[in-house]
Amino acid sequence: MSSAAELKRSDNLYIHPWDDFVKIGEHRRTLLDRGDGVYVYDSDGNRLLDAPAGMWCVNIGHGREEMAQAVYDQIMGLTYVSPWSMTTGPAAEFAAQLAELSPGDLNHVFFTTGGSTAVDSALRFAHFYNNMRGKPNKKHIISQKKGYHGSTYLGGSVSGKERDKSNLHFETALVHHIDAPHPLHKPAEMSEAHFLDRCVGNLEDKIAEVGAENCAIFVAEPILASGGVIVPPDGYHQRCLEVCRKHDMLYLSDEVVTAFGRLGHCFASEDVFGIVPDIITTAKGLTSGYIPMGAFLVSDRLVDEIKSQGGDAAVFSNGFTYSGHPVAAAAGIKNLEIMQREELFEKARETGAYLQRQMQTLRDIPIVSDVRGRGLMACVECELIQGGDDLAMDYEIGKLIDKHCQKLGLIVRPIINMCVMSPPLTITREQIDELVAMLRQGILLAMEEIEASESAPAGAGSRHPSPAA
Ligand SMILES: Cc1ncc(COP(=O)(O)O)c(C=O)c1O
């Protein structure tokens, strides 16, 4: 067995997501080797509260023995079969459970390997749907700036985070972005109603520009998660769905993050935002990250339409070796059983409200410029220079907060100048107090380090007052 030091060296041969190639060979990532509930432990035995639940995914918490047992039993019973020509009990049963829990008539499930492949497959489905009903021009996709929809070629293309668009190539002919409905972008003098009209108007304008006859689908996260937990104004999704209906476009609600309890319900589209979209994509909490799996759910209406217009055959030539993997499906079934037995959605509604209240107490820290969220999704945004837009400084704040929080025993997810929280649904009020206290201290220490550093820029804007001021 390799030592921790050897493993850290070997880790530099492992290209991680979003790796910086200039730093390959020099990375010193924290090596984690154990998890239990909301905590993980590093190779030195230090306990860390896992505030992002991995990557918004370990919803039932770490180290559940009955999940291990369910996975073991399935491997020993039947490891794998081809999803093309065969099926398995777990895959069929899990599909039926998801259909039962999903909103409206979203009763058909296409299993994938994760969120990116769910989004990619759903978009290919939208193209398939329009081909089958004789509308081959309706192929264009509209999505949101600050949205994240994955790392396949198409998923990356519909993602709208500008800072991720630098070094790769993307599909631009068929993909269009509109502004994210970010409440912070509402001018102070503008009413909520007017702001909502403007956000929805962005979609209408884009459809007019592209031509409704060319538009296939609108893609939106119920809450833009990795874009910084952006909660749209009330009524946004309902109004956008109406616009889609008017223009014969599909509405895809990307619930890779928001489903499976994060907002206190199995799916957020209907229960939180009052819409029944045409397609929902999901992953992460689907198996609580124990085994990779994703899915898109699609309405009976669309399936029936294809069926009635497809002629002799309507083959959807899209799928993966691991679509409906029985081990992943068995994990998904056990995950749902745990969530339901322990009433985790109901609990998340209560602890989510508490998390939001406690996070708001951070507003008194001078560099904290915004605190926002809903349910068990929260974001604290920091700004070193008032009104500044210095990317290097923004990155520095996030990295410093992350460094100090880790020393204090808290994992945060730094995204530029934001720290994002999405703890396991099992988190208690006491653990939320612990989280917020460590976060407060981590931000203050980061702020002090920046204030003390000689490299702090001078004259680039007005600096925030020191905490003592
Ligand atoms: C909203 C959303 N969609 C899609 C994805 C891609 O999922 P995956 O990383 O499982 O491929 C993510 C990942 O964070 C996501 O947040």
Image (tube, rainbow, N blue to C red):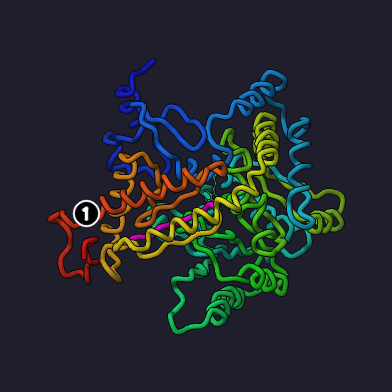
The residue sitting at 74% across, 65% down in the picture is 135
Give the residues in magenta: 376-382
Seen from this angle, which residue lies furthest top? 1
Q: Quadrant of the N terminus?
A: top left
Q: Main secondary structure of the magenta part?
A: strand
Q: How many numbered discs sit on the rendered protein?
A: 1
User: Residue 248: horizontal and vertical position, in percent?
Assistant: 72, 70
- Residue 122 visible at all: yes
**Front residue of this view, candidates 307 and 256:** 256
The residue sitting at 53% across, 52% down in the picture is 376
**Front residue of this view, candidates 274 and 375:** 375
Q: Which residue is mark 1?
A: 448
Q: Indicate left or right for 155 with 12 as reference.
A: right
Q: Which quadrant of the figure has residue 276?
A: bottom right
Seen from this angle, which residue lies furthest bottom? 189
The residue sitting at 27% across, 57% down in the picture is 392
Q: Quadrant of the C terminus?
A: bottom left
Q: Tell me which amino acid carries mark 1.
A: Glu
**Front residue of this view, candidates 126 and 132:** 126
The residue sitting at 48% across, 69% down in the picture is 182
- Residue 171 visible at all: no
User: Residue 423: horizontal and vertical position, in percent?
Assistant: 50, 45
Q: Counting other residues with Cα less than 10 Å from the Cα at mark 1, is it few (<14), some (14-19), or many (20 or more)?
A: few
Residue 164 located within the stretch drawn in magenta:
no
Q: Which quadrant of the figure has residue 45?
A: top left
The correct choice, above or below, for 29 with respect to 231 in the image is above
Mark 1: secondary structure? helix
The correct choice, above or below, for 355 with respect to 323 in the image is below
Q: Indicate left or right for 215 with 93 as reference.
A: left
**Front residue of this view, candidates 225 and 12:** 225
User: Residue 7: horizontal and vertical position, in percent?
Assistant: 35, 24
